[in-house]
Structure formats: structure tokens, C-alpha cells
């Protein structure tokens, strides 16, 4: 017995097209589309019919940068795979790619197995993994080849966090050379961690302990310098490069200059850099701790460069870097010493709505919204066209989105397992109404009807964005 659903009367928006169309879903996949009101569309029949009149019908969001249950700074990210994927669904995201972590001295395989165990049977939506490589040596380089073959085709390295995740230039070059040979994509946290540690030590010695100093010591130039260095190392290795959480105009300029040379260099930014600023870090008392993340929030004037980068395609993806820590008991670990505040913000539930607000505000167009939040992340990380679009054969990961509904973002109403919202009180236009994951309802008329274990592990091919 096949399961069929028809979505009628909505404006189907993909990265390339907008069309008033009916969508036929069969056995978890999109079977057909036909212009609404035509005989072809009238021929679609199904036991379940969703009326999307006056609404958008969009692909489920693809968030390729999340950290569920991440151990960091003596604590753990507060969202589990169960709570985090449920919150993602509420926000119109139907696929996440999370980061499995190699512990120093252990194998990549052991780290990946640990993350599989955390996620399996617990996710409301589909998921994949990147691999954080903490220890570049002959063994881990060989393991990179095996992981690419089994669908973990991207590897994150850090120029920041000495003593935790940091890799020196020689190790980065070796990993890039390996990726050049096996088709993997290197993701880079580009900040000069060694220099930042000096500035942290000096600031604390001067008694500068408040959260705002977190942003001041992680200087814009140290992000730009590391971005430049990562690009040159990737050129030497002949490897593509994806720079995560780009926050500053100077770093965007480095990416743009590389792309103008025709280099396979890509950049991601996050909603926090587009909608929040260093002003939040400077909020009175210890409130600024809520906004401590790395790269840090920047002075507001950097936002224009980020929006421009998204319009010119010098930045290709908006992900969340969702890594929530509760204010009470977690962020508070850094009272009196900003360097001990766990780095990370909650956001997996807010991304699609905030980017729709950017459409309303005129920063980007509707199709660009879908491109940076759904299609390009899927292509960049080998999930397209199974994910990220509405087309025959694609997984029926579909959101019915009300572009006129107004909502106020608040910790009182969000579903992330964290005691504050980074966007508390922000009024936005647009709201998720219904979410299907592989044709099954997860959110139905603003009610959660999904379940832990519906989401399955999704192996990925290599980057499809290089052409």
C-alpha cells in the first residue's frame, strides 16, 4: 500500500523557480509537480491533501553546521539529538549535518562511532556527519579516505583553540593534500588561535573579564589573516576550501579575492552575524555571556559586507553553528573570566524564519533564501538533489510556510533545550505551518506529530558545488 499526499495551491519556491503548483508525494518521495488548476494537477489524488493556498511550499531547510551534545569547556551543548532535531523541525529544517569529534590520540572511527551512537534512534529528521580532525597523523590521514567512501566527505580543522582542536599549518596542509586526493572538503575555523591566546592573557591581566572582551580579543584582523592563510594553504594543496562562520568584512574580502582568481573557495555565515552585533556582547551585567560564540559577534558595520557577500555569492551558505549552552549553570562558568564562557549560541529553530525576514527586509530575494538555506548546503555537502529542492525523485522534505503570519521569537515559546533566546523579543514575519520529512508529517498545523527515530543517517557524496 503506497502512501500518497498532495499539496495543493501553494507557491512552490526553489533556488531556481517560483511556480503555483500542486505537488504529488508517493512513498516518501516527490512523484510529480503540475501547475495548479491544470488537468495534470487535477489528476493528482491521494488520501491526504494539504491546502497550501496563500502559502509557500519550500524544500526543508538543510543546516550543515550543528553541534548537538558537543563536549566543550567542561560542559556539554544542552540540546540532545532528540531535542535539537525536534527544534530544527519546528523551524522548518529537515536535515542537519552535525560534527563528530576525534578525541586527540584516538581514531577518527572511534569518534564517528560515538556520534552515531548519540544520534541513532533519537532524531526527528534526517542527519549526516562531518568529522572534526583533532590529530593529523598517518593513521587519521588514511582514515579520511575510508570515511569519504562511506559518506562522511567533509573534515573540519581549527586554526583556533590551541590545546583543544588546534592544528598547525603543516598538519592543515597534509589534511588538505589528502582531501585533494580523495575528494573530501576541508572546512576551516579560521582564526589565529595562538595570537588570540596572547591577547586573552593580556586582557585578563588588565582585569578585563567581562563578556564584551571576548569579542575584542578575537580581532577582525586575526580572522582575516587566518582566512588568507587557509586559502594559500589550500592553493598549495590543490584542494577546495570551505570557511565556516565568516563574521567580518575583511574575511569576506579575502574570500572574494580568492574567488575572483577562480579558486574553489567557499564561505558560510550564520544568522547571529547578520542580525546580532558586538552591542549584544556589551549588554549590562553578565547578559553579554549569552552571545559569546567564536568567531565572535562583530560591530554592526560588518553586517552590510555579509549581506553583500550573500548577494554576490562570495558567501554561499547560511548555517547556524547551533551550539547551545544554558545561561544558568553553563554560560555562568565564565563569570569573572570571559575565556571560560562556553562558546556557542542556540539557533537551529530560528534560521529559516530569520532568513525569510531578510527577504521581507529586502536583503535577499525569495529564491536566494532557498538557495543559501536549502539547495547550496545540500550541493556543497553531497546531498543534492535528494535534499534541498522540490523535484521529482527528491525526498519529500517539504515545508508549508505562511509568509504573512507574524511571530515574536522568545525562549518561552521555542523548542530548543536552552533557557534563553539570542533573538528574544524579535518580531518576524513568516512562520512554519506544516513540515514533512520523507513524506511523513513532523509538524502539522503548528503541532509536533513526529517522533524520535524517524530521522535516519544519510550518507553523502563529495561536494557537488565545484562545477
Image: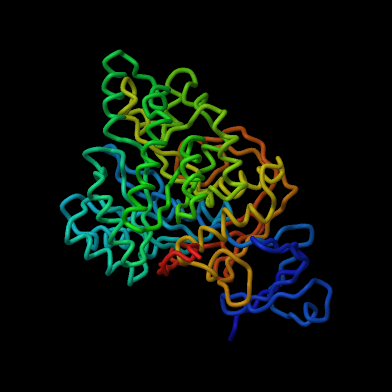
Q: Which of 147 and 252 is in front in this view?
A: 252
- Colour logic: rainbow
Residue under the image location 66 percent in, 36 percent down: 427
Q: Which of 362 and 356 is in front in this view?
A: 362
Q: Is residue 27 left or right of residue 38?
A: left
Rendering quarter of residue 37: bottom right
Seen from this angle, which residue lies furthest front? 261
Seen from this angle, which residue lies furthest top? 206
Seen from this angle, which residue lies furthest bottom? 1
- Residue 88: x and y in percent read 52, 53
- Residue 195: x and y in percent read 29, 30
Q: Nearer the viewer, residue 168 or 232?
A: 232
Q: In this view, does 161 lie to the left or right of 385?
A: left
- Residue 104: x and y in percent read 19, 49
Rendering quarter of residue 51: bottom right
Residue 158 vs 210, above or below: the answer is below
- Residue 47: x and y in percent read 69, 78
Q: In this view, does 329 lie to the left or right of 94?
A: left
Residue 52 vs 275, above or below: the answer is below
Rendering quarter of residue 24: bottom right
How many marks are shown on the rendered structure?
0
Residue under the image location 34 percent in, 19 percent down: 209
Query: Which quadrant of the rendered structure holds the N terminus?
Result: bottom right
Amino acid at each position: 500500500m503506497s502512501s500518497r499526499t498532495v499539496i495543493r495551491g501553494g507557491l512552490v519556491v526553489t533556488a531556481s523557480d517560483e511556480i503555483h503548483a500542486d505537488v504529488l508525494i508517493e512513498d516518501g518521495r516527490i512523484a510529480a509537480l503540475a501547475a495548479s488548476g491544470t488537468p495534470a494537477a487535477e489528476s493528482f489524488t491521494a488520501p491526504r491533501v494539504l491546502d497550501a493556498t496563500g502559502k509557500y511550499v519550500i524544500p526543508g531547510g538543510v543546516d550543515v553546521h550543528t553541534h548537538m551534545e558537543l563536549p566543550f569547556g567542561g560542559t556539554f551543548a544542552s540540546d540532545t539529538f532528540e531535542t535539537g532535531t525536534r527544534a530544527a523541525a519546528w523551524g522548518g529544517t529537515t536535515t542537519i549535518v552535525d560534527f563528530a569529534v576525534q578525541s586527540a590520540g584516538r581514531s577518527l572511527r572511534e569518534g564517528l562511532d560515538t556520534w552515531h551512537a548519540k544520534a541513532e534512534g533519537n532524531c526527528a529528521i534526517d542527519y549526516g556527519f562531518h568529522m572534526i580532525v583533532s590529530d593529523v597523523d598517518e593513521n587519521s590521514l588514511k582514515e579520511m579516505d575510508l570515511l569519504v567512501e562511506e559518506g562522511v566527505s567533509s573534515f573540519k580543522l581549527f586554526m583556533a583553540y590551541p590545546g583543544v582542536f588546534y592544528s598547525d599549518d603543516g598538519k592543515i596542509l597534509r589534511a588538505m593534500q589528502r582531501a585533494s586526493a580523495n575528494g573530501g572538503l576541508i572546512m576551516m575555523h579560521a582564526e589565529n588561535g595562538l595570537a588570540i591566546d596572547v591577547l586573552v592573557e593580556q586582557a585578563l591581566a588588565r582585569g578585563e573579564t567581562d563578556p564584551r572582551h571576548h569579542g575584542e580579543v578575537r580581532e577582525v584582523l586575526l580572522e582575516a589573516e587566518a582566512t588568507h592563510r587557509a586559502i594559500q594553504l589550500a592553493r598549495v594543496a590543490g584542494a577546495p576550501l570551505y570557511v565556516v562562520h565568516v563574521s567580518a568584512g575583511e574575511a569576506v574580502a579575502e574570500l572574494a579575492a580568492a574567488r575572483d582568481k577562480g579558486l574553489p573557495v567557499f564561505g558560510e555565515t550564520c544568522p547571529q552575524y547578520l542580525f546580532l552585533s558586538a552591542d549584544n556582547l556589551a549588554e549590562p551585567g553578565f547578559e553579554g555571556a549569552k552571545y559569546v560564540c567564536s568567531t565572535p559577534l562583530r560591530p554592526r558595520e560588518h553586517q552590510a559586507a555579509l549581506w553583500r557577500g550573500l548577494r554576490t555569492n562570495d558567501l554561499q551558505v547560511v548555517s547556524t553553528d547551533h551550539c547551545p549552552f544554558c545561561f544558568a549553570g553553563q554560560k555562568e562558568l565564565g563569570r569573572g573570566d570571559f575565556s571560560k564562557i562556553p562558546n556557542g549560541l542556540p539557533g537551529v529553530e530560528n534560521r529559516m524564519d530569520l532568513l525569510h525576514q531578510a527577504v521581507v527586509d529586502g536583503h535577499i530575494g525569495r529564491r536566494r533564501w532557498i538557495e543559501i538555506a536549502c539547495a547550496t548546503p545540500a550541493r556543497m555537502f553531497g546531498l543534492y538533489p535528494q535534499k534541498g529542492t522540490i523535484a521529482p525523485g527528491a525526498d519529500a522534505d517539504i515545508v508549508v510556510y505562511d509568509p504573512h503570519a507574524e511571530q515574536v521569537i522568545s525562549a518561552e515559546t521555542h523548542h530548543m533545550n536552552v533557557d534563553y533566546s539570542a533573538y528574544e523579543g524579535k518580531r518576524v514575519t513568516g512562520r512554519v505551518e506544516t513540515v514533512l520529512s520523507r513524506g511523513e508529517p513532523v509538524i502539522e498545523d503548528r503541532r509536533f506529530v513526529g517522533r524520535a527515530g524517524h530521522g535516519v543517517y544519510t550518507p553523502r557524496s563529495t561536494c557537488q558545488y565545484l562545477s
